Image (cartoon, helix red, strand yellow):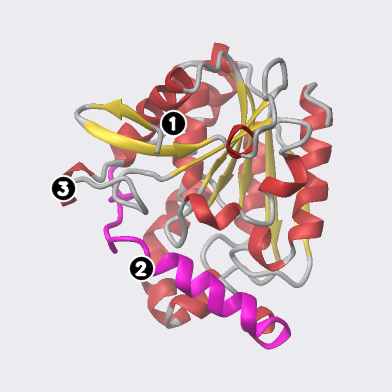
Amino acid sequence: MPFASNQGINIYFEVPGEAQGNSARDKPVLVFAHGAGGNAASWWQQVPAFVSSHKVIVFDHRGFGRTVCAADAVDAGCFEEDLRAVLDAAAVDTACIVCQSMGGWTGVRAAVSFPERIRGVLLANTPGAVMCDEAAENLAELPARMAAAGGLVDRAISQQFVERSPENAFLYQQIAAFNSGLRPDISDPEIYMTPQQCASSGVPFWVVASDLDPLFPELLLRAVAGHLGATLRAVKGAGHSTYFEMPEVFNSIVDEFLQAVGTPG
């Protein structure tokens, strides 16, 4: 199993096309960065859609899946350097990053820290590490909103999805069960970037919002997209995990994003 190393932590990653015997040489690179309810396995509905046209990379953030570390090492302020280590280990110069929820901290911080290697960032149901007035207000309200939302199902996937596709809702919970339960502290002000820093990076941003997301509501993400000058795509009928609940819609948006930033499928 391939691992990249950063700060003494072994970051698990996969290049699925290579594992299937397909040559990824000379293909544009597409990295998927999972959220706090997921890991590398979460992208099972995206990898097959893009593996023929892109060198696809999935990985486990520190403290998730097969990336094991101490509790005090689960730090979103290290996420971008973990990603850089993965890119280096996979012999990748530049990549587009699709970020779900917590993965948005990885994508935003990478875009600001080493923009020459990031061709575009798609923030899916997340403001990521972008700090603005609206994001600060949402962050202050988030603990209460999460408590009100109840368990994993109501927070991460919508009740409508559970009723529509109970087998995939069960699979979501099984994938999440492989995680350690550790979470980074996203209240740390040191891990955030301003919209101006993001704009100065020159990296194009896209934002996906959904109307049933209880954690990062559509209104918030519209504001974040406005601050970033980002392209916004709003999805109806999905909760916090659009990529899992509506994969065809989500994959179509990703394809549009890739076309726009110059890495067509």
Q: Is residue 177 magenta?
A: yes
In the rendering, which numbered label is found on residue 102?
none
210 sits left or right of 12 in the view: right
**Residue 91: horizontal and vertical position, in percent?**
51, 16
Q: Who comes first in sequence, dot 3 or dot 2? A: 3
Dot 1, crowdedness within 10 Å: few (<14), some or many (≥20)? some
Q: Residue at x 37, y 54 (%)?
A: 65
- Whether residue 158 is visible, yes or no, is no
Q: Quadrant of the N terminus?
A: top left
169 sits left or right of 77 in the view: right
Q: CA distance from mark 3 to mark 2?
A: 24 Å
Viewer-nearest residue: 254 or 87? 87
Q: Amino acid at mark 1?
A: Met
Q: Is residue 180 magenta?
A: yes
- Residue 167: name its quadrant: bottom right
- Residue 13: name its quadrant: top left
Height in image: 51 above or below 118? Answer: below
Mark 3 highlights which residue? 70
From which residue to which does the magenta span run?
163-188
Mark 2 highlights which residue? 143
Mark 1 highlights which residue? 193
- Whether residue 60 is visible, yes or no, is yes
Height in image: 76 above or below 236? Answer: above
Q: CA distance from mark 1 to mark 2?
A: 21 Å
6 sits left or right of 263 in the view: left
Per the image, label 3 sits on a secondary structure element best described as loop
Q: Quadrant of the C terminus?
A: top right
**Residue 80: horizontal and vertical position, in percent?**
40, 29
Q: Amino acid at mark 2?
A: Pro
Q: Who comes first in sequence, dot 3 or dot 1? A: 3
